[in-house]
Amino acid sequence: MRLLLSPLMNCVSWRTLASFECTGTPASENNSPSTAAQPPVCKPKSTEDVLRLLEHQVDTTTEFKLCVDREGLPDRGILQWKRKKAASPASALKVVYIGEAGIDTGAIRKEFLTDMVSGIENRLFEGAGNQGKNPKYSLTDLDNDNFRTIGEIMSVSIAQGGPPPAFLRVWCYNFLWTGEVDIHSLSKEDVSDIESGFLISKVEDSADEQSLMLWADELVSCGYTSQLKLDNKDSIIRAIVLHSTTRLIPMLQQLRKGMELYGLVDQMARNPEACHSLFVPGKITKPNADFIMMNCQPRFSEKGTSKERTDRKVINFLQDFLQEVEMSDGETDRAAGDKEPLAVPHVLQWMTGQAHIPILPDEKRHFKITCKFDHDCRERLGDQFICYPIVSACTKTVTFPVKHLSTYTDFRRIMGEAVRYGGGFHRV
């Protein structure tokens, strides 16, 4: 018996398995002959205004083309980005995945930026995600100019519809828009590297000076030069905090240099509150099951027919699947030995190319996922075939092979396999 998996992707890439506040006086309205006319100066008033302004800075007359392999991101993406000497990242980004036929009309770019921003967070930053992260202390990445490159990638992601890098500590964000560190605002909560955190806990747990002396060499390396006494615990911990954070300044300086693309640093300096949510966790929420279901637009079969009842059953299966994934929080996948547990953002990315909720109100308002139903796949292919859902990421359309989804057990298995292994755009 021959078992054939139907293609998992195709779109022109398919996947399956605001207002501004202006100040200044125009010359015609300047009534004082001794005062030079002031040109209007427009300042964005909100996060949405900043995003629109940055979007208009993209040079859409030229392209910044990248050809990358899905495996090895973000390192391969960073490397290829740096090698594009003849093109400018200020141009419109176009992405081709090696070995895939998908044509980038927007969805592939968003998918690449989604994977790159997530990969950069995991590869080059450390700390608790819900409280923000610091750059890793990596002189190798600094010497290779990698932090400047990821600053450019972050800028492109914000300006061209990708996810914002909303995973930084507040003090890191403050440095990016001011260029300075307020050392008086730093606390032990801003320490993210394991070694410094371990040393702080040892100092806090020390019951006598002899216990402190066990860590003398490490404390001297942190820049502490006073006596090791219990009364000086606060000063000792303060030295560790400053050592752990201020040594990251070169990484942040290089990151800031990369973020000068599109004038992003200038916009942050002019509108620090408006840009805050783009870089610091808190305001930008992750997509959940309700977000996907509320934005689904099923194209049911003729009302009152058996096909319509089948279509509605499949949509209910989809809702159950999303809610199960959301509630399990990856525990089922970890128990099964999967390296990367399935999450609702993964499903959204599989459907649309992006794993984040659109930030701009008009983009969010028009964000819809069309659900279609294929009742004839077995007539076309026969019973020996296993059909998976087909996704057109650029049009945000999912087509379900209903004959293979007769039970929720079948739906859960086929959808799980499609989302996990249907990552390529192999049909046009």
Image (spheres, grey):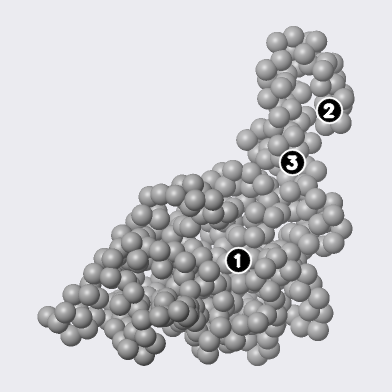
Kindly state the secondary structure of the residue where label 2 is placed: helix
Q: Would you name the residue on which mark 1 appears?
A: 115
Q: Amino acid at mark 3?
A: Thr
Vertical placement of 185 versus 333: above or below?
Answer: above
Q: Foreground: 155 or 374?
A: 374
Query: Closer to the N terminus: mark 2 or mark 1?
Result: 1
Judge whether 204 appears above or below 386 on screen.
above
Give residue 175's position: percent from left, percent from top: 70, 51
Q: Position of residue 74 (x, y in %)?
A: 69, 64
Kindly tell me whether residue 238 is visible in this rendering: no
Q: In the image, what residue occupies the spot 64% across and 47% down?
A: 133
Which badge, 1 or 3, comes first in the chain's sequence?
1
**Circles 2 and 1: CB atoms closer than 8 Å:** no
Q: Please provide percent x and percent y for residue 105.
A: 54, 85
The residue carrying mark 2 is 218
Q: Residue 115 lies in what quarter of the image?
A: bottom right
State the SS at label 1: helix
Of discs 2 and 1, which sits in the foreground?
Answer: 1
Left of 202 or right of it: where is 48? left
Estimate how packed mark 1 is, as few (under 14), some (14 to 19) or many (20 or more) residues with alpha carbons within 10 Å: many
Q: Nearer the viewer, residue 254 or 330?
A: 330
Rendered image quadrant of residue 391: bottom left
Residue at point 74%, 33% (across, down)? 196
**Whole-Å distance between the Cαs marked 3 and 2?**
16 Å
Left or right of 295? Residue 64 is right
Q: Which tag is nearer the camera, tag 3 or tag 2? A: 2
What is the quadrant of the N terminus in the image?
bottom left
Q: Image quarter for residue 267?
A: bottom right
Q: Amino acid at mark 1?
A: Asp
> What is the CA distance from the residue labelled 1 to the residue labelled 3?
27 Å
Q: Which residue does the numbered mark 3 point to in the structure image? A: 245
